[in-house]
Amino acid sequence: MSRQLNMDTVLQNFWKEEYLREKMLRCEWHRKYGSAVKAKQKAKAAAHLPLKLPTLAHKAPLSPLPAPKAVPSRAPSPALEAPIQSEMYPVPPATRALLYEGISHDFQGRYRYLNTRKLDVPETRYLFPIATSFTYGWQLGPPVKQERVSCKMCCIESFFRKNGAFALLDPRDLAL
């Protein structure tokens, strides 16, 4: 279906005037509000710049006070130091040693290490569930393998319908 163009000189002049009028309106708006828009854009861009903190001048280190000789100095115990907060238990040394044996291309090294770590249950790797999706696999216990007791024909007969989706019988269904 072809498009009918009813364009005569009057209609062409109308569209020409409309186009020029819109062009003049755009130029007038830009002359009036263009500088304000540019100022807002610059302010917005300046707000997104990273905040630079002032640098502190280095002060000369204070001379250490002489320690009294009567009190023996001893190393701080590891229990008093702040423990390193980690989400995971430390890796056993035997598993960590797998990292340094061979290369991943030969299914050793990092490849073997990651596969070994993957076999551990989450409870042995993590202190607590990190994500909410961890709750699905947390403390499930060992997997239980169920033996199938039914025969193959019982499964086929119970799975497939003899009549199909429609009430009409198909001769191929009767062959089973």
Image: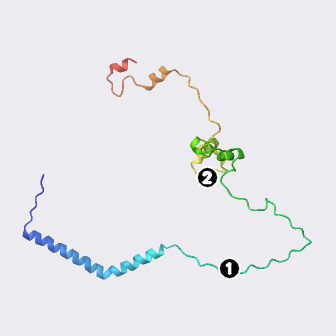
The residue mark sitting in front, 2 or 1, is 1
Q: Residue at x 69, y 48 (%)?
A: 91
Count of marks, rendered view: 2
Q: Nearer the viewer, residue 134 or 91?
A: 91
Pointer 1 residue: 58
The residue identified by callout 2 is 130
As drawn, which residue projects farthest toward the right? 70
Looking at the image, is 29 positioned above or below residue 124?
A: below
Residue type, label 2: Ile
- The residue positioned 26% from the left and 76% from the top of the image is 26
Q: Is residue 139 left or right of residue 30?
A: right
Q: Residue furthest top?
A: 175
Q: Residues within 10 Å of mark 2 (few under 14, many from 20)?
A: few
Sort mark 1 into few (<14), some (14-19) or many (20+) by Cα contacts within 10 Å.
few
Is 174 left or right of 18, judged from the image as shown?
Answer: right
Tag 2 secondary structure: loop
Looking at the image, which residue is at 45% across and 23% down? 156
Would you place residue 175 above or below residue 100 in this image? above
Residue 162 rendering spot, x and y as whole percentages: 39, 22
- Rendered image quadrant of residue 102: top right
**The disc label shown at residue 66, or none:** none
Q: Earlier in the sequence, mark 2 or mark 1?
A: 1
**Residue 106, how many percent across, how many down?**
58, 41
At 47% across and 20% down in the image, what residue appears?
A: 153
Mark 2 and mark 1: Cα distance apart in space: 41 Å
Quadrant in the picture for residue 119: top right
